[in-house]
Every structure is written in structure tokens, then in C-alpha cells.
Image (tube, grey):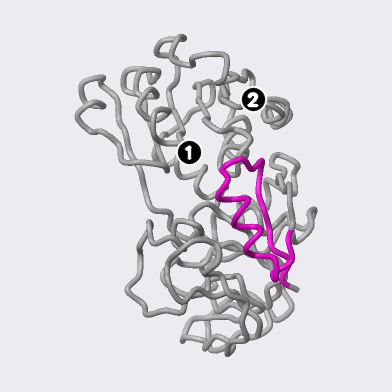
Amino acid sequence: MKAVRIHQHGDGSVLKVESTPLPSLGANDVLIRVHTAAVNPVDSLVREGIFKFSERPFPWILGWDFAGTVVDLGTSDTSLSLGDVVYGRPALDRDGTYSEYVAVDPGEIAKAPRSITLEQAASLPLVTLTAWKALFEIGELKPGGTALIHAAAGGVGSAAVQLAKHRGAHVVATASGDGIDLAKSLGADEVIDYRNEDFTARGRFADVVLDTVGGDTLERSYDVVVPSGTLVTVAGAPDADKARQLGITAETFILDSNGPRLAEIAELVDSGAIRPVVTKAFDLDDVQEAHSLIDSGRTRGKIVLRVA
């Protein structure tokens, strides 16, 4: 099969399109013919060696978002059938989805939403699972609560705005440029242009803050969380002492794959509650260009790779 592998850490030049053996199926794996894989910032962090989660020897196949078709059930005990169109976010500690085939645990995937394309479906797993866990499992966002979503035009941010709005929260988003109109179109009640307005000037107003930016944005976000509220970051290390002094909770997490949750998300997509935001699609051979765009930090929504 064709796949994108890295043989060492480094910049985009380490991404190599190569011919590799098909993945071997474990006892509880199914084999997926990948149609589309998504490109996420975590892919660059793994490529550069900043985010390390595995002691496996090189080479590695990157990518942990996909949509495709079940072509082999192996010996797995699953309700899936050959030919099912599925999507998912496989575990990080094995080869990923920048490849024509991927072996996955069926518990990590679900049938893809029927109302959207496979390119759109591939864009959803990581960002929707991340936003769901941050807002609802950790942040315990309730209907009527207020959520501040940073970088609302990005991958996780665009998903978070829609999920929070569907939950019945008041959504305040930060964005800039054409991202302001995008955030509004996704359901944000208020959008702060962070280039012209200091979001901390509003005082403590957010029950839950979701930070996907890190750095100074994370540091200033503590001051807008209401007492007993929650700051969740996926872009830095929380300061537990600072949070304790303010009477709030500050957390981060490593995302687990979750097939049943993806089944719920597929229903939300098909009901019209969530729409994917795909702004650029590349062929697999152009993976270096796709990573260059991700590395720029100036993307809207999601970038995907057409594999099939």
C-alpha cells in the first residue's frame, strides 16, 4: 500500500510517501480502506518529536483521523459488516491513517454520518471528541452556562462552538479576520476580535473556558473563569496553584478514542446540529504542503488528505 512515513523527527521534509506492507490485524482489529485522512496540529507535534507517546522504533505512519470502508473483519467480535462506511480516531500508539489501509480496534470507530462526504467525515473525530470531553466531561458545561471558546475558527474551536451551542450554552468566541464571520455562522452568540479587544476586560464571566492556543492566551484565561468554574487547555500545562488561588479548576488531558461517542456525534451531524468545516483538501502525495499549512497556525477549520 501507499503510506506517508517518517524515519526520524524533523520538519515537513521528513514526511516520505512510500510503498509499505499492509498492516497486520491484531486479535480485535478490523481493516479499513482509507478514503480520507485529516491533518491535525498534533501530527506536527509528533513529527517534530515535541509530543512523544510511543517507544516504537521508526518508521511511523502519522495521522489519527479518517473515514473509509471496512474491508476485513479479521477475528474481531464486532457488529460492523464488510462494506460499512466508518470514521474514527485510532489510538496514538500505533501506525496512523496517512495510508491506504489502517488496522483499528472497532471500539474506536463508528459508522460515518450519512449526510456528509467522506472528506467532511474524516475531519470530525479528533476535534469533536476533544471538544466534547473538554466542555462536557471535564468542564461540565450546563444549559444556560457560558463558554468561552478560543480560536473558534480552528478545528477544535469550530467543533466546540457548535457543541456548546447545541447544549444550550451562551457561547463567547475569540477569532480574527474572516474567522469572525465563521464563528458567528457556527452559532457563537458573541465573537471577540482578539486583535482589537482584550477578552479579560469583561472580568470573570465564563463557566468553562476552552483554550487551544496556549501561551499568553492561556495565562490570561484564568482571570475570566467564574468561581468554581473550569479552564480546560489542550495547548499547555495548567497552573494548579494559580487556579486554586482563584477558586477554579484548570485541567488538560490526553484524548482517548471513543467509538460510542462518535456514534452520538454522527447522529448530531445527520440531524443538522453540527456541520464540519473543511477548508482545504490535498492529495496524499502533497502531504508536505499540507503540513506546511498546519505549521503556519493560520488555518480555518480542518485540512484533509485524499487517500483513495
Is-magenta flag for residue 291? yes
Give the residue at mark 1.
212
Residue 148: x and y, percent? 50, 25
Is label 1 in contact with label 2 (beta carbons under 8 Å)?
Answer: no
Give the residue at mark 2.
188
Amino acid on which the number 1 mark rests in the picture: Thr
- The region drawn magenta spans 282-307
Q: Nearer the viewer, residue 285 or 198?
A: 285
| Quarter of the N terminus within the rendering | bottom right
Residue 5: which disc? none
Occupied quadrant, residue 296: top right
Give the residue displayed 38% in from the left and 58% down from the top: 51
Amino acid on which the number 2 mark rests in the picture: Ala
Q: Nearer the viewer, residue 241 or 2?
A: 2
Is residue 105 in sight in this rendering?
no
> Regarding mark 2 in the picture, which secondary structure is present there?
loop
| Quarter of the C terminus within the rendering | bottom right
Q: How many marks?
A: 2
Mark 1 nearby-residue class (10 Å; few <14, some 14–19, many ≥20)? many
Occupied quadrant, residue 177: top right
Residue 36: x and y, percent? 70, 65
> Regarding mark 1 in the picture, which secondary structure is present there?
loop
Rounded to the nearest angstrom, the CA distance separating label 1 from label 2 is 17 Å
Is residue 23 in sight in this rendering?
yes
